Amino acid sequence: MNGPRTIAAPVTGATRRFFGGVGLLLRGLGLYVRSPGLMLLGVVPALLSAALFVAAFATLIYFVDELAAWVTPFADDWSDTPRSLVRVIAGLAFLGLGGLLTVVGFTAVTLVIGDPFYEKISERVEDRLGGTPGAVEVPFGASLRRSIVDSLRLVGLSVLFGIPLFLAGFIPVVGQTVVPVVGAAVGGWLLAVELVGAPFSRRGLRLPDRRARLKADRATSLGFGVAVFLCFLIPLGAVLVMPAAVAGAALLARRSLGQHIEES
C-alpha cells in the first residue's frame, strides 16, 4: 500500500504548526495519567538502552580531552591560551556529535528491544481514536526485521549528517551557536521519522512513505521531533519520555495521513 507521490502541505503558519507538533508530544505525556501501567512498561526497555548509551557517552566525556588533542596536532606548539581555546572547541564538537548519535542510537535500539511494548502503546492511542484505517497484518518477525533495518538506515543518516556538523563545530561562534540549533533540527527530524515507524508499518507503509508524508508537513514533524530530541538530552528524560514519544508519534502519523487525532 503506497501513498500518493505528491501530498499537499497544510496552509497554516509554519510557527503554529511547529508548536502543534510540540503539542503532540504533550498529548503523549498525558497517557501517563490515562494508562499508567502501560506507560511504565514502556520505561523498562528505555532503562536498559539508556544504561548502554549513558556509559558510552560517559566514556566519550572521559576521553574528550585526548580526542581533542588528537585532532588538533597543529596546535601543539602554540601558546597556552590559543591551544586551550582550539581544543575546547574541538571537545565541544566531539560532544555535539556524540550527543546526536547517542540520542538517535538510543531511540533506534530502544524501539527494537521494546517493540512489543511500544507497539501496544501505539495501538492503544489509535484505538482511542477509532482504530487503524487500512490496517494490514504484520507478523512479529517481519515487524522486528523492519524495525532493525529502518533503524540502521536512520543511524547511518545521523552519522552522514553528523560529520559535517562536527567539522562545522570548529568554526568559532558559529560552531557554538548555529551548529547546535541545526543539530537539534537534524536530530529532531530523524527521531520523527524513526518514531512513526510502527503506525506506518501497521498500514503497510515503509520508510520512503514516512519521509514523504512527514515532509508534506515538515514544520509539525520538526516541532514534535525537536521537542523529543531536547527532552532526551535531559538526564532521565529519554527514559521517562520514550513511551510518551511513541504515543505522540502515533498522533503525528495519523495527522500526516490526514486522519483525525481527536477522540469522538
Image: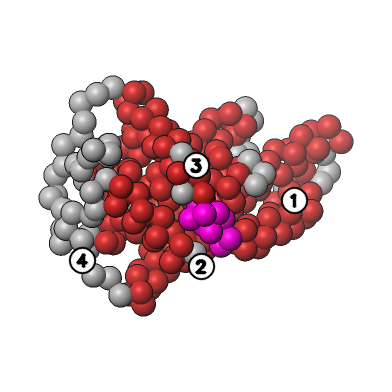
CB under 8 Å between callouts 3 and 2? no
**Can residue 138 be seen in this snapshot?**
yes
Label 3 sits on residue: 33
Q: How far is the residue under mark 3 from the one under mark 2?
A: 24 Å
Label 2 sits on residue: 113
Name the mark nearer the viewer: 1 or 2: 2
Q: Amino acid at mark 3?
A: Val
| Residue shown at 75% from the left, 42% from the top | 87
Q: Give the crowd class for mark 3: few <14, some 14-19, many >=20 residues within 10 Å.
A: few
Report the span colored magenta.
37-46
Q: Considering the whole magenta stretch, tell me its main secondary structure.
A: helix
Task: Report the disc number at residue 39.
Answer: none
Name the mark nearer the viewer: 1 or 4: 4
| Residue shown at 54% from the left, 46% from the top | 241
Q: Earlier in the sequence, mark 3 or mark 2?
A: 3
CB under 8 Å between callouts 1 and 4? no
Is residue 43 shown in magenta? yes
Q: Earlier in the sequence, mark 1 or mark 3?
A: 3
